[in-house]
Image (cartoon, helix red, strand yellow):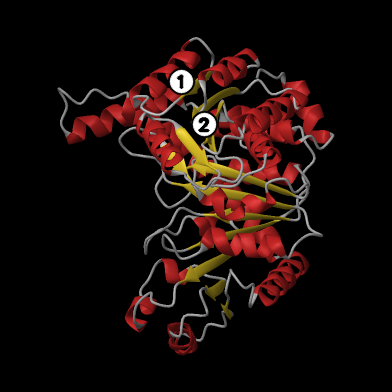
Amino acid sequence: MIKVLVAKPGLDGHDRGAKIIARALRDAGMEVIYTGIRQTPEQIVQTAIDEDVDVVGISILSGAHMKLVPRILELLKNNNSDVAVFVGGIIPEEDAMELKKSGVVEVYGPGTPISEVVERIKGYFEHANV
Amino acid sequence: MQMSESQILDGIRSGNRKYFAKLLSICEDDPAKANHLISNLEKHTAHLIGITGSPGVGKSSIINAILDKSDDKRLGIIAIDPSSPFTGGALLGDRIRMQSHATSKNFFIRSFASRGTVGGLSPSIFEACDAFETFGVDSVFIETVGVGQSDVEIANVADTVIVLLSPDGGDEIQMMKAGLMEIADIFVINKSDNPLSKGLFSKLKNILEMSKKDIPIFLTNSITGDGIDNLIKTLEKRFSLMLENGSLAEKRKKRVVKHAQAILRKKIDRIFETINADRLNIEEIEKEAIRKICNKL
């Protein structure tokens, strides 16, 4: 069973995308926890640890991704967590490259087919023991 | 992340949340291993409080309101939401209402999916409660799935059952029905700002008097916090009384039997999944199941 935390950090309240992804992952047979909007990196990381999830999916549309995502990665690292981090939202390509270099598994922009996200997450765990 | 048994045990003994979180995952994925680990840890009796009621009645919100006023306590929260009978997936959304407490050192909130069990709980609910008792919490709040009239399993798990009602929940005939309305140790009418709540209060009071039952009824508002202090005080008093008069020990004894029954039921369910029904009629399936059970046990 793959457990996913769908998290929405920062100040933007547009969570239609996060909800659609949460619903799609549910329909793909995963257990999905949704944090709701306006979460701090600290809240997201503590929730990921307490819920013992395999994946954290971060949805961010506000443009603050280069501040918030690295902070989440740093806090996860401080907690020795090996959870897989995915990011979705309005992310320019050069930022996406940088985020991936610093440990994000994949960054998805607008128009990504949902099936692609589902398959990527499933594929990521195919060889792992979850 | 792979962790050895001794790492998990040491981690929990030193109060590390990450290891406790892992123990809760083991409760879900491998209950037999979880029971083994739990038996190696010291347990502190905690007040197991079930909160049940229909979907949307405010179960998560009232837990949040209780957390708002419980800074000095160590509390565990088990929040259960339904799994899909078709895909096995689940959307666990109870946490959203309590998320302002996510970073609190004294509270541990954990979401569980019902994973095919009926009755509004998780198949590993007994193990999960036992696990929380090894983590040194004062109380564990168990939030059931939004339930219907006959989901009464929580009464076998919790020391105290709170049945939460919504002011527009129906007439007195609904309240006279068997099932959910019979398992309450405490009734809470939530959303007390709704003018209908006072009417429900007096209807419920009348019906309880008719059946000569002395069950407290509270009116609460989870958003303003009205009525929450009284509810907390009553829960505390009830727990110390149960410890004193031996009724807790009595309940826990019965609970062990229910736990064993739950384990056995799960095994039997698994045996039924292995029966090939193509060539068998009902009677033969029954016999085949009994034969397999006798071989296994």
Q: Tell me where residue B278 appears, x and y as whole percent.
A: 16, 23
Q: Secondary structure at mark 1?
A: helix
Label annotation for residue B109: none
Is residue A53 rendered to the left or right of residue A26? right
Q: Earlier in the sequence, mark 2 or mark 1?
A: 2
Marks 2/1: CA–CA distance: 10 Å
Percent coordinates x, y for residue A80 in the rendering = 74, 22
Q: Residue at x 58, y 54 (%)?
A: B142
Instruction: Name the residue at 46% across, 90% down.
Output: B206
Q: Above or below — where is B245 with respect to A123?
A: below
Of A5 and B234, the residue lying toward us: A5
Going by the numbered disc 1, the residue's amino acid type is Ile
Secondary structure under tag 2 reads strand
Q: Chain of mark 2?
A: A
Asked whether B58 or B118 is in front, the reply is B58
- The chain that hosts pointer 1 is A
* Residue bearing the label numbered 2: A4
Q: Please state, as top left, top right, bottom left or bottom right, where the N terminus of chain B lies in the image.
A: top right
Label drawn at residue A121: 1
